[in-house]
Image (cartoon, rainbow, N blue to C red):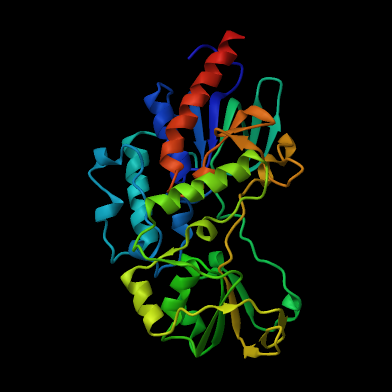
Amino acid sequence: MTERTTDTSVVVIGAGQAGLSVAYYLRRLGLDPGNDFVLLDRGPGTGGAWQFRWEALRLGYAHRVNDLPGMEELGVSFDTADRRAPAKNVVSDFYARYEEHFGLQVVRPANVTRVDATPDGFLVHFEGEYGAREVSCLVLVNATGTWGSPFIPWYPGMNDFAGRHLHTVDYGDSGDFAGQDVVVVGGGTSAIGFLLELENVAKSLTWVARRPVEFLEDQELNIEAGVNAVALQDAAAREGRALPSIVSTTGVPRSRRVQAAIDRGLLAAQPMFSSIEPDGVRWADGRFQHADAIIWATGFRPELRHLAPLKLREKEGGIGVGGGAAWRNARVFFAGYGPTASTIGANRAGRTIARQVVATLSSIEQQ
């Protein structure tokens, strides 16, 4: 790389699947980790959002976790990983090996608080082990995902509920709900996972979903459904609209475990209640269900607060992104956003974004 006026050429924010994928390809394209690009990660350990998942979650219970690019060099694969161990431990272990093998030199914990535009590029502010720090760069890749921005829809009476409100990020162990009446809200794999774990633990379980739940005939997400989901995410990102959830556009795979739960009547979602009362929830037709806890498995929104100073949002409410780059600033790239927000497209996008980043750097050098 030629001499630069910034601390590094590229800063990648986030070391989950999307960030590691971009970093792998940047390295393949000749950029030196820790010198030509810096990878910042908020988490205390490896594994991206997986390190925060609940203990009982296993790899076979969730959507498929794709291998990172180049993972075959390590001799490991999620396809053959231990299904008996907690998923959080397996993913964290594999990602740790991956980072070490490719020398990615991830800086953690590094909680990025804001990104400012500068004449040369960007100044990234973050809180780390040694307090507030900053690093300047020419090009920015945002790969923060969604785990840090849980979404809970508002319903009348929410603040009056005497029980516990919990989001997916707050769920720890099924034993916390022993003997309780629990309402689970959501139509995706997390909601179903909670129902399966709580079936013989909670006193009663009530499942409600904001939209009808579609169970796919396939045991895994099929290619056609995946392509359609990516297309819808891409269209929303290009138009700067709020992004649809992946599960709302793909449905839920009908695994053997899920089918067995359907057959015994566990997975029968009721329509959404209309209000919340101090001791439960009530539907528009007057029906009432007592509740000690409401678990909101209602998804996430992209974690983008730190990018607010860059003024990238469109009037439609989202950030306009095409081909991985922001419409309002072509030096800002997004991995794990829109069509790359899940394992469906993250690895493929890593290569594309890395190539675009290198092309952008070459263009800057020629100016």
Q: Residue at x 59, y 72 (%)?
A: 166
Q: Which residue is found at the position 65% from the left and 24% from the top?
A: 121
Numbered label tally: 0
Q: Furthest residue to the top?
A: 366
Position of the C terminus, as image quadrant, is: top right
Residue at 49% over, 28% down: 37
Q: Percent x, y for residue 230?
A: 50, 46
**Up/down of 6 relative to 309, above or below:** above
In the image, residue 250 above or below residue 268: above
- Asked if residue 7 can be seen in this view, the reply is yes
Give the side of residue 315 with respect to residue 351, left or right. right
Q: Position of residue 258 (x, y in %)?
A: 38, 73
Q: Measured from the top left, where is residue 40 in percent x and y?
A: 52, 39
**Residue 176: where, in percent of width, then height?**
50, 80
Residue for point 67% across, 29% down: 329
- Which is more toward the observer, 342 or 59? 342
Give the image quarter of residue 26. Answer: top left
Q: Is residue 336 shown to the viewer in this render?
A: no
- Depth check, front residue: 219 or 5: 219
Q: Is residue 291 left or right of residue 90?
A: right
Q: Is residue 194 above or below residue 265?
A: above
